[in-house]
Image (tube, coloured by chain):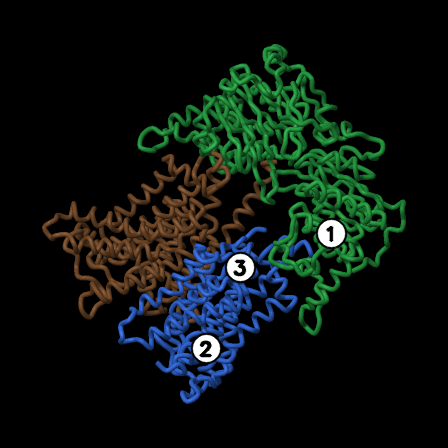
Amino acid sequence: MTSATSPAADRTQPAIRMLGIDKSFGPVRANRGASLEVMPGEIHALVGENGAGKSTLMRILGGLMKPDAGKLEVNGRDVTGWSTNDAIAAGIGVVHQHFMLVPTLTVAENIVLGQEPVKSGMFDYQRAVADVQALSKETGLAVTADRKVSELSVGEAQRVEIVKTLFRGAKILVLDEPTAVLSPPEVKELWGVLRKLRDAGGTIVLITHRLDEVMDLSDTITVMRAGQTIERLKTSATNPAEIARAMVGREVNLTGRDAEALSATAEFMASGTTPPSSEEYSAALEVNDLVVVGSQHTRVIDGISFTIQPGEILGIAGVEGNGQTELIEAIAGLRKIESGSIRISGHDVTDFQVDERRGAGLAHIPDDRHRRGLILDYSVSDNLLLGLQDEFVSRRGVLDANRINENATKQIESFDIRPPTAALPARSLSGGNQQKVVIAREMGHEFAVLLASQPTRGVDVGAIEFIHERLRAARAENKAVLLVSAELNEVLALSDRVAVMYRGKFAVVMPAAEATEETLGEYMIGTRKESAA
Amino acid sequence: MTSRFREQVEEALFPPLVALLVALICGDLLILSYGQSPASVYRLLLEGTWGNAYGFGQVLYKATTLTFTGLAVSLGIRAGLFNVGAESQLAAGGFLAALVGLGLSPSIPGVIGVPLCMIAAAFGGGVVGAIPAFLRVKFGAHEVIVTIMLNFIVLAFLNWIIANHLHVPETLHTPEIHTGAIPRLSQFIPGFHGSAANLTIVIALLAAFGVWFFLFRTRRGYELRAVGLQPDAAEYGGIHVGGVWFRALTLSGAIAGLGGINYVLGYKHYYEDGFAGGSGFLGIAVALVGRNHPLGVVLAALFFATLSQGGLAIHAFVPKQMVEVLQGVVIIAVAMSVPEVRRALRSARRPATV
Amino acid sequence: MNPISFATQMIRIAIPYLFAASGGVIAERSGIISLALEGFMLTGAFSATLGAYYSGNPWIGVLAGIAGGLVFGMIHAIATIRYRADQVVVGIAINLLAVGVTRFFLKLAFASSSNSPRISGFPARLSAHGFDNPLLWMGLLVTPALAFVLYRTRFGLRVRAVGEHPDAAESVGIHVARVQYVAVALSGMLAGLGGVYLALDQHQFTDQMTAGRGFIAVAAVIFGRWDPVRAALACLLFAAAETLQIQLQGNHVIPSQFVEMIPYLLTIIALAGVVGRAIPPAALGKTEH
């Protein structure tokens, strides 16, 4: 299909213009006054952290959702609140992060779905195959029309997605995190395709949080944070650090940095990542050559080794999606590992179940409190015993209501959970207070090693300071902390040592005192590499 | 906190009330189609059930079995599993209870015989529940289909045993049990004379209390509900999801199986082919209307028992099959309104939570 | 044992299964769990009886039966698609409802709680082994017809896409709910036809005359792995087992109860994946997508 309405000939009129877009899901405001302007014939990067509202904005553009407020123009035409079909007809093609392909159908069937060629009442499959082959040849995007999608590699599937949008006459292509699952050669190939499409007059919006990709490919950039548009930049006139600052936005208080603790561990840090063997037994957490294989048979954790001493915080920085979640889940026992070993306080826990690892001294603040960390329909007091339920049994498996209540009262007070009502379901608390419930539970009892994954995500400023204080206190009490955070400032402010994760490996491990945002940023985006053992 | 309680009550009560309204309207239409007056038929229905001791006794008897099957289904749902096999678990429980009652010597007193038969009943249902549990945990086979298929297999198997090996000639039931009979209520309250209501109702109420206590007061119950609400969070909390599923379905089967004693020990004193008669399937309706809470289950069991007994009371004027229609209507109406009511209540509350 | 009489008896037993299983395949391929086939069949049988009785014409009975199945199919569709009610619960409730409705109206129309008066059916001349019954031919043709619709038409492609990945279908502008409505309506009509065949073959309606055939069809759908042809083969297999049991009756080789178990046992084995796992459409039973 080709769009009859004004082609993107007018170079001064934006291809896409979104103004003051609001969109809420229940209490969550995904977009609040977001805007976007993309000129025809450019590759435009839409960047921001997870949950910044990028995908929602693109769903509105693609007609999958209607905005609560705001205006959407495509090629100068007001199309606010249009449908998927309208968007397709107007030449918008969206390649979703999770492929919108039916695995049991063939490539050709998927590409023509919804606009199937029909001959004498029947679906004309031969014609579909022929059309797809012709389009494949014309665009140079190699796809095999007759194969089932379930048999394709991720790279091939992505090509199918792009061909699918082109088959529908897309002039504006939106790609949501297209490289998240691709291997480096596949990424390179995709870049070639996108440049070619742009040079042929196409407009491309690239959603990503990988800054190297942004710098590499885009002409212009829009940065989003917390549902709002923060900045619009020209790629040639900016640098990764500036983009990263705009993405993260808020400055974290750096004055609380504990200088004594730093010097206390300085000697150890100087020895780098290979501590002397005599110290191995004193390590609180020891991870050896860990390998985790992902759903696409790729190594999402590709041979990571490290140790954390009691009284030390190891911070892991990195762009999200480089294996941080998998690393934490593998240590917690929630993800199967391919090879390697994990020791807690000298005990080999590699074959331990989740509860046994907790018993060995592990505490875990998970990155997704809504899915993992809390049972939203359980009360605060019941959530405060998740994972510790064995300890609150009085006799014969009966839960001890008195101790549960005492525990709740104590934790609510010492962690300042508001409102201080133990019987309230966790669902009705604010994000910051939900997180305090998780932290109170995990840090409110004996532990040797704490996994803290995105501990301040979606939490208000006051709660952030509170959580930081707690992590420092844990270090002072000789606990070992593995901190994963997307906030570079946070990692730098809290850690004794900093590691950067890049594509399943530690790109570098260095003392926090020596690290700067700039150097870490370069490791994060892969422009600087150093093999860390 | 009180407002939170009110919200919970609203969310629990609205769907059954909507369903009741829809059922009343359908009932009106059916009664009118038969040329009768809805008001007088409904009055008759109430008089024949709650209006006299015999009718009320029959309601209690029917509600007893439904309480067991309703508890069984609701326990499964609390763990995130759908046990459609209560029908055959009930039958298997009744059968094993009868088998033990037949095998024991008549000299064994009831205080020993009854518990032994009860254990047998729970064991029978538990075994039938453990099969889909095992297949689910081990192979991921969907418990809905497996329990449906098992209903047919188990009932056919029991039919074969009865028809070929254990029946009293010219019947499809076993001989009477030697020990293990549970006394009827009419022995204590003469007004119940002729009705099948028996002391199993006390066991049913204890079972309801036991399920409530288990779910809301024990560690295992805490873990079971966690798995049903958020399996990922339960796993994070060190709970073995597969183990919880296995125990939940097995226990669910055992509760349904225990229900078999109402007929076998409390009423006829023998096992008869087909005695379950749909009580297992109706257990799904009871759990649904009772919103998977033991107290709700008891009330819903009374409601469905009233409908079913009420059918007999009105039969002279309107075919008793009317109540079967209404049962179906109630289930569909509740199933339809549960998601709607939840959505409506949540969106009505939204401004307050933002 | 006479092979001709075996084959004809097997086919006569298989026809209602073939109709109902076809209905099950199309509904489940669109993502809606189909446990109400038994209820659709029973309403189909009863409506056909009413139609044939009052008109004296079996073809009116056929149309009435299809309409009966359609009405119950639409109740199922509205509850599960529009109101997102639990598909398992609704399926079971429809089966209960169908028993109640047919019994109530059996009483109302014919003042009986067991069976209707004799109705006209299709001539089932024994010389031709009942093969001049047009419904029999329809039952044999329903499988290739369904396979054609599912694999060779635009609608079929969309049904398969919707049942497997509704989000993908929606993202290319397909109305997921509309496709599912049509699929479930078709399922009601097809299963209804299975009931029509029973009523017209026996020249009357009897209480609960479907006797679990709808669940054998459910078993055939799963054992046939949601494919029209394989499901049809499963129907024939189950029918063959029944025929064998009937023809061997008196020989006491295998008790009939054990033959009855075969479809269900095979289905459980298929689900457990002991011999090649049966994998349902990915979006089957999902109320939210």
- Disc 1 residue type (three-letter): Ile
State the separation of the CA atoms marked 3 and 2: 25 Å
According to the picture, the residue beneath numbered tag 3 turns out to be C32
State the separation of the CA atoms marked 1 and 3: 30 Å
In the rendered structure, are the residues bearing label 1 and label 3 in contact, judged by CB atoms less than 8 Å apart?
no
Residue occupying the point 28% across, 64% down:
B159
Front-lying residue, B43 or C273: C273
Q: Chain of mark 3?
A: C
Residue occupying the point 56% across, 54% down:
C283
Res. A162 mark? 1
Q: Which color has been applied to chain B in this rendered view?
A: brown
Q: Which chain is blue?
A: C
Residue A512 located left or right of residue C243 = right
According to the picture, the residue beneath numbered tag 2 turns out to be C197
Q: Earlier in the sequence, mark 3 or mark 2?
A: 3
Q: Is residue A73 above or below residue A493?
A: below
